[in-house]
Image (cartoon, rainbow, N blue to C red):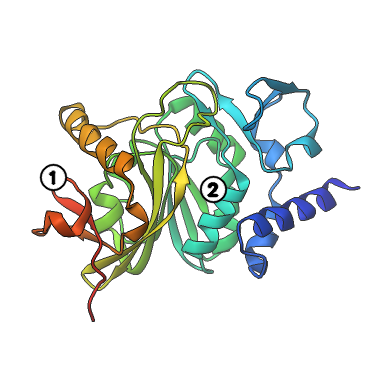
Amino acid sequence: MELADVRRVFARQMLSIADATEDQRLEDAFASVPREKFLGQGPWHILSHWSLNTFVDRDPPLIYQDVVVAIDEERGVNNGSPSLHARWMHLVAPKEGDTVAHIGAGNGYYSAILSELVGPDGHVIAVEYDEKSAQRAKVNLADRKNVSVVHGNGFDWPKDKTDIVYVNFASPRPAAAWIEKLRKGGRLAFPLGVPPPSRRSGGMNVNAVSFLVTRLNGDYAAAPIAPVSFVFAEGLDPESKDKELKALHKSLRNGGWDDVKSLIWREPVDDARCWYAGPDWALSFDEISG
């Protein structure tokens, strides 16, 4: 098989796992982006539920399956599960001409897929905290005129109104920019979570729950996506982090996140109606009225 055919089969498989088989634009985007371009020269460290120690030479067909590949083992960062991202991208549904802030862009692979979805009239802002990864992303995405790579703290982005905020690290709270810079109808996908229980490369331990938040006028609908495993945020304010993590640990341990219906932002809340309440925000069981 030609590598293009391998990518097409891969795309169809990932969309099938993600329950998104009818999303032709998403299939085409996954099929068009060469994953191997974003993984370095190898040998590649492929991570799965069965093994954390599979090293393979640079053989592109081997990474067109639902596995994650280490890109920075010291930081515990990997290329991410393709089926997970297929599910998320199907849910946030980028359209031609949209602006997407990709927070925690790594080496840029999923930024490239997002750029395919928004098209030449759209824009992807790929924000990466780690300087080396940001530089690699700039090289990897240099041929994509609708992508801007930013080396910066993801909690400070986006700076302007945005259609989609797509966050790829676990955080104990959403950043103000992720919420307040969403346009009406804008969508935020992010993992709410705590540090993983170990720093094994790949972090196969579930340490977060992912949520989809949609801005409706001044209110925010919210829906759970799934439990996930993500590297934990860098660049958090250390003064507030410990208290938030303790409360969030308790909520994650108690469960009930699957009944969340809305996100309350900087308004009074009834703790009894919330799955989790942070200092100035909450995830509530109440639906948005009207």
Residue with the most extreme right position: 1
Residue at 70%, 61% in the rendered image: 28
Rendering quarter of residue 213: bottom left
Q: Mark 2 sits on what residue?
A: 111
The residue closer to the viewer here, 33 or 122, is 33
- Tally of numbered tags: 2
Q: Amino acid at mark 2?
A: Ser
Please state the horizontal and vertical placement of residue 150, each as a whole percent of the image.
42, 40
The residue closer to the viewer here, 79 or 289, is 289
Query: Which tag, 1 or 2, sits closer to the chain's start?
Result: 2
Please state the horizontal and vertical placement of residue 122, each as a whole percent of the image.
50, 63
Residue with the most extreme left position: 268
Q: Mark 1 falls on what kind of element? A: loop
Q: Amino acid at mark 1?
A: Pro
Q: Mark 1 sits on what residue?
A: 279
Residue at 62%, 32% in the rendered image: 49
Where, quadrant-wise, is the C terminus in this rendering? bottom left
Q: In this orientation, does residue 228 appear? A: yes
Q: In this orientation, does residue 142 appear? A: no
Please state the horizontal and vertical placement of residue 204, each as a whole percent of the image.
53, 31
> Left or right: where does residue 219 sit relative to residue 280?
right
The residue closer to the viewer here, 104 or 241, is 241
Kindly identify which numbered label has been placed on residue 1. none
Please say if the residues under marks 1 and 2 sit with CB atoms less than 8 Å apart: no
